């Protein structure tokens, strides 16, 4: 699904919460695991204002951004 990244917030030690807007679901909040690690592939593309194709997965409590 296409999304525009609105903001990023720190969450736990290496994770961040990503707030984005999608046409299908509206404003959503996802957790991106390991985003603050130096070797993270997603960190450069998840800057606020970016237009991306994202995939998510439902966890027990939260939805996670997987790509």
Image (spheres, rainbow, N blue to C red):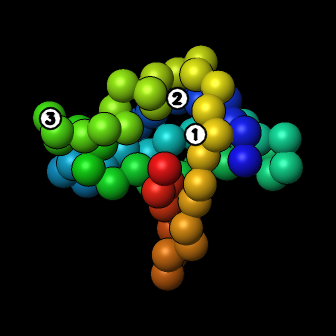
The residue under the point 85% across, 49% down is: 24
Q: Is residue 38 left or right of residue 52?
A: left
Q: Is residue 11 left or right of residue 26?
A: left
Location of residue 55 with respect to 50 vertically, above or below: below
Residue 6 point in image, percent of width and height: 60, 27
Whether residue 62 is situated above or below residue 65 in the rendered picture: below
Spot occupied by residue 49 in the image (x, y as percentages of width and height): 59, 18
Mark closer to the chain start, 3 or 2: 2
Q: Which mark is residue 38?
A: 3
Q: Which residue is mark 2?
A: 7
Report if the CB atoms under discs 1 and 2 are less than 8 Å apart.
yes
Disc 2 element: strand
SS class, disc 1: strand
- Residues under labels 3 and 1: Cα distance? 21 Å
Cα gap from disc 1 to disc 2, whole angstroms: 5 Å
Marks 1 and 3: in contact by CB < 8 Å?
no
Name, please, the residue furthest toward the right: 24
């Amino acid at each position: 699904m296409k999304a525009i990244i609105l903001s990023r917030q720190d969450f736990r030690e290496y994770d961040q919460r990503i707030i984005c807007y999608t046409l299908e679901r509206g404003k959503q909040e996802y957790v991106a695991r390991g985003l603050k690690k130096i070797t993270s592939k997603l960190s450069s593309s998840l800057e606020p204002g970016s237009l991306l194709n994202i995939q998510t997965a439902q966890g027990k409590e939260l939805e996670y951004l997987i790509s």
